[in-house]
Image (tube, rainbow, N blue to C red):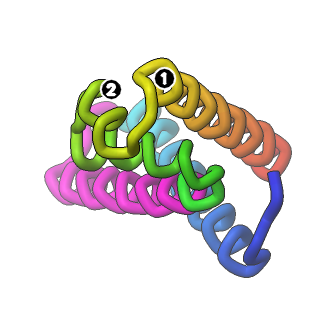
Amino acid sequence: MEISSLPAYLGTAVKFAVFKGMARSKKRKEMMGGELLDDDVAHNETEQRLDALFMDEWLRGVVEELPEKARLVFVYSRDEQLSIKEIAGKMDLSPKSVEYHMTKALKAIRESIRKMGIFFQSFLS
């Protein structure tokens, strides 16, 4: 994976590490203390929303690094919810080419997720 902006990459990595630590702390608290208080539930919902925002930001960064056609196919499919046939017509490609570019995009995203998981395991251990 090529990192275009080290400060942004490290900032995102630290955010995820902090949230993972908070989740571990919450789990320990649940195991030791039983029921969560109302404040803890509200805090947990806020954490989940922040996690979702950071994951969306991270995914968009990964998508931006994809080759142009793979990126466009992924965006048309996921953001605009176009079918393979509709994407093929819009990009003037065959449906098989669209499938190829989607497979390429998903493979790159899965690889980034795998690498990020390895990074967090080493970072938090």
Q: Position of residue 12 (x, y in %)?
A: 61, 67
Look at the image and tell me whether residue 22 can be seen: no
Which residue in the structure is indicated by mark 1?
Answer: 99
Residue 84 numbered tag: 2
Question: Mark 1 falls on what kind of element?
Answer: helix
Q: Residue furthest left?
A: 38
Look at the image and tell me whether residue 77 can be seen: yes
Answer left or right for 104 relative to 97. right
Mark 2 or 1, nearer chain start: 2
Whole-Å distance between the Cαs marked 2 and 1?
Answer: 7 Å
Span shown in magenta? 34-62
Count neighbours of disc 2 (C-alpha within 10 A) and say few if under 14, some if 14 to 19, many if 20 or more: many
Q: Nearer the viewer, residue 34 or 11?
A: 11
Q: Nearer the viewer, residue 87 or 57?
A: 87
Mark 2 touches mark 1? (CB < 8 Å): yes
Of helix, strand and loop, which mostly describes the magenta segment? helix
Q: Position of residue 117 (x, y in %)?
A: 70, 38
Q: How many marks?
A: 2
